[in-house]
Image (spheres, coloured by chain):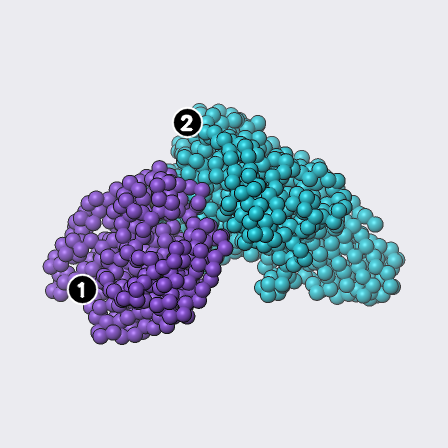
Chain colours: A purple, B cyan
Amino acid sequence: MKPFDYIRADGLDLAAQQLSHNGAMAIAGGTNLIDLMKLQVETPAALIDLNPLPMNQIANEGDGLRIGALASNTAIANHAKVRADYPVLAKAILAGATQQLRNKATMAGNLCQRTRCYYFTNIDQPCNKREPGSGCGAIEGIAKLHGVLGTSNQCIATYPGDMAVALYALDAQIEISGNDGAARTMPLREFHRLPGETPHIDNNLDAGDIITGVTLPAPVGGTQAYRKVRERSSYAFALCSVAAVIAMADGRFTRADLAFGALAHKPWYDHRVGEMLIGEKPSLALFDKAADLLLEDARGFGANDFKIPLARRTLAATLCEATGVEA
Amino acid sequence: MSAHLIQDEPDTRNVLDRTTQGIIGKPLSRPDGLLKVTGTATYASEYDIEGCLEGVLVTAPFAKGEVTSIDDSSVTGMPGVVAVLNDKRMTPRAIQGTAGEAPHTGLCKVDYWGQPIALVVAETFEQARDAAKHLEIEFNSEDAIFDPAACTPEPDDDPTRQGDLGKAMSDAEHSVDLKFTTESHASAAMEPHAAIAQWDGDTLTVHASLQMLNYNISELADAMKLDESKVRLVARYVGGGFGSKLGVSQDIVAASVATMQLGRPVRVVMSRQQVFQNVMRRSETSQRLRLAVDHHGKLTAFGHEALVSNLPEEDFAEPVLQSSHFLYAGKNRLLQSETARIHRMTAGSVRAPGEAVGMPVLEAAMGELAEKAGIDPVQLRLDNIPTKHPATGKPFGSHKLAECLQRGAEAFGWDGSDRTPRQRREGEWWIGTGMASAARVHNVGEAKARVTLHDDGTAKVETDMTDIGTGTYTILGQIAGEMLGLSQSDVLTELGDTRFPRGPGSGGSWGAASAGSAVFVACEALREEIAQKIGQPVDALTFKDGLVSWDDGSVILADIANGENFTKEGHFEPGDIAEDYTASGFGAFFAEVAVNRWTGETRVRRMTGAFGFGRVLNAKTARSQCLGGMVWCIGSALTESLMFDPTDGHLVNPDLAEYHVPVNRDVPDLDVLLVEERDAVASPIQAKGIGELGMCGGAGAIANAIYNACGARLYVFPMTPDKVLAAMPVD
Ligand SMILES: Cc1cc2nc3c(=O)[nH]c(=O)nc-3n(C[C@H](O)[C@H](O)[C@H](O)COP(=O)(O)OP(=O)(O)OC[C@H]3O[C@@H](n4cnc5c(N)ncnc54)[C@H](O)[C@@H]3O)c2cc1C
Ligand code: SF4
């Protein structure tokens, strides 16, 4: 761990300025950042502790819900309105990490958590994400955790988290305060990036940007499910996950918002998959067709080849459960 | 002052059944439990020592080659940095259990990725860690082989060949010829390897996390070129070892070199990643099983072959076949093992070396054989229990396999009914059951312990034996209390210091029987002395609650002492009894699993283990050992695997987030049956080892249950969802 300065934030504007300095990084729960600092993967010159900022409220906003950037994962998952109206979010959060970690982990920190790629976290290995231009250790190495969709020849890492997968299905918006103090909002589905030629950039935050909150649209009801496939029943990252918000009328899909975790560098939302389901009667054959579309361009790298059939099966399992199709 | 017992004959006196204090075997709680849960038990690195410097190991970013230069000046100016050490006494590899010497010293030659190459010492830990990352080194690296299948293995010394296996296989009514693989395992003990070394100009004192101080003192003295009398090792509490702390690890020698060179105490704690990368791994294995039965269900062919690996110049080879030699009968036998020399970190003892991976594979193969032959798997085992060692002809000291199978089956509700797979589904989960035998050779070693009876009627036990979380403090106090007629609270046990009488330490499940016997021998001598003082034969005396009584008299133990302390040193030696008998623990596992039909995720729903391991010294600590073993069965069956990069051989998952040991939710209610047994051959206290038996075979029960549940026959451990899915029949 490199020595660093520690600054407690005193107002959003000042924090944004401090964060614009080279080598400064925001810290929230610290559960991801500090681990990476110990490994010398992250070497901030200064940590700006956001915790003094009043950003942990969860409150109604219009018909929707606004969740502050510092709200803890535990607080979000336990919130009455989240449980009632956005159960997929509560389920996804509770499928992640452990109670102790969720108590510390924040909304914003969770969205910004970095990949668990084994080569990224080992500074003696090549990694284009950690050190642009150094190569990718995973492509020729053990790519078990890695992506099958949207990969590039620079990087095949996955975004590892659970909560964001649900937020993609719910079509949340993210609020960001720029380093000039100006606030902006974007669909969360556009927040994380694919690796392309710039795998060192995980998301669309600029220097000095601070995430201030996430808003959920008015509740859509329906059946909501989050299914996470993992090696052990807790405290393991997903091998594949599916968040689903499903509504039916007259035995046909009227809504099928689906997002997938652990398959790509970002939670994977492919609007075509939901669209092809709308108006159709649920059946195993239909779910298979949806999977064909989802996995059309999927490509494995050896150790993660299994993710392609697994994603197909997990999608079918989730849809069977949500629609009552017997298999 | 010393009493010596060499056990050449079975000890059928069963003295501990005739004593009357009534605490032996009882589920007494640990005297050290409160200290541990309140954080006041001091572990190796936790001693607050004034002026202690902090050392951090620098490790090699390549697997094979040579460090050609280390540029101290790259860090010497950094804040707090005191020294960079690369000394020819330092050890590059963890030392094998019971080595008693330091066969590898000098850090410049590198043989595995992550090997220590230097120690950076600074005033604070953070300064040392930062400097360690900045140290500039130059090296020449060479190509190396990492894949055991990619080299020509060395055959091991003495294969067993009896009869004609090939012919028996082709003549057989039913046979299986199967190949399995198991992956490398880590001990993954909670407490990292850590040491604080202090040199006072004459003596080197090291607080370290170690299992076998008696061997470790020789190893450290050898590395440091010191006389053993100038070395003291202290390990009062050890936060898990599982074999990884049998031998001296690199941190200990590095801290010792540093304190001697710098004249200040030095602490070295391995990071979690360094622990994974540097201490013993269990070898991965490839195994071939050839088994055949005749139409009576009697084994006619028994072939078990294994390929394991290790670094060049290591003597240890995972003894995969250890219990296969005697578990089942069968005339035509072939048991042989080979070792591939590869450049992964040292392979050595990880809990239950050998059986931990040999037994699950054998038992999975037995499961498949039972199916082929149409025999209930419990029956197949019952029908093939040998009456004596099939190769050596030596009789067993005692043998509880049949009873464990029967009692375990009954407790689990195994009814021998239809074993056709894919018969039971609950929602999206396939449910199935499976079983396996357990076996683990019994080991015992020479041990000494001192027992002092104080004039206030309390007693003290002292030995360098360690308590690695297993309950040694508890059972040694219990044995002394039982023998001397004292309650648990009247016996103080002191462990883990080479200033105490020496014993073999903890490892190979031999601690309880060895150190326990030494305590027993000391107590027998004390009883004898008391008997002489009283003028009665010892057999006429009853020791209970601090009172010694006989036919027509009694005396308070404290009064016999009459202001004096009596001390006896007990010295126990196994003698040549092992040449005449086979001693082993046996047991049986029954498991029920649920396999997700969509995802291949497998969860153990319930598991029963029945074990016979000689005298139960404490029903609570013994049960805990069995529970722990069964948890390891779940891990080795379903999740645990060290993964190595194919290009440079580094371990890719060196932490507890990605090396998946079972978590609380993976472990259902586990049912443990302790099958009481007296093994007169095993030790004078009739106890055998229990620390490892609980994991010897259970992963095979889980494998068999997976097949029974969903019809997926897997030949790879661990059976992760990707593997299960690939083997699952399409529905
Ligand atoms: C062993 C382990 C297992 C885990 N398992 C799971 C799992 O199964 N599923 C899962 O989803 N997660 C899992 N996690 C990850 C966990 O969810 C994240 O560590 C946590 O959500 C990060 O939140 P934090 O507040 O602690 O972030 P921090 O560590 O404080 O920060 C993370 C990143 O976010 C940035 N950041 C924080 N707040 C802001 C802000 N307001 N604006 C801009 N940038 C910001 C920081 O600069 C940093 O780069 C696991 C973690 C561990 C250690
Ligand atoms: S997959 Fe991405 S994160 Fe992993 S090594 Fe390659 S570049 Fe780095």
- Any mark on residue A200, and which? none
- B670 or A266: nearer the eye? A266
In this orientation, which residue lies closer to the viewer: B626 or A266? A266
How far apart in space, not on screen, are marks 2 and 1 (Cα)?
63 Å
Residue beneath label 1, please?
A247
Tell me the SS state at disc 2.
Answer: helix
Figure quarter occupied by ligand 1: bottom left
- What residue lies at 45% left-to-right and 33% top-to-bottom? B146
Q: To which quarter of the image does residue A219 belong?
A: bottom left
Q: Position of residue B170 (x, y in %)?
A: 40, 26
Give the residue pinned by disc 2.
B171
Q: Residue at x 83, y 50 (%)?
A: B1
Q: Which residue is found at the position 65% from the left and 37% from the top? A: B89
Residue B299 visible? The answer is no
- Circles 2 and 1: CB distance less than 8 Å? no
Q: Chain of mark 1?
A: A
Give coordinates of residue B200: x percent, y percent. 74, 49
SS under mark 1: strand
Q: Locate residue B280, reporting x and y percent.
A: 54, 42
Mark 2 or mark 1, whichever is nearer to me: 1
**Of B18 and B624, which appears nearest the observer?**
B624
Residue type indicated by callout 2:
Asp
- Under mark 1, the amino acid is Ala
Identify the chain of the residue marked 2, using the numbered disc in the image: B
* Nearer-the-camera pick, B194 or B531: B194
Which class describes the residues within 10 Å of circle 2: few (<14), some (14-19), or many (20+)? Answer: some
Task: Report the side of B32 relative to B651 (left or right).
Answer: right
In the displayed structure, would residue B48 be above or below residue A136?
below
The x, y position of residue B712, in whole percent, is 34, 44
Judge left or right: residue B343 versus residue B88. left
Q: Residues within 10 Å of mark 1 (few under 14, many from 20)?
A: many
Quarter location, residue B663: bottom left
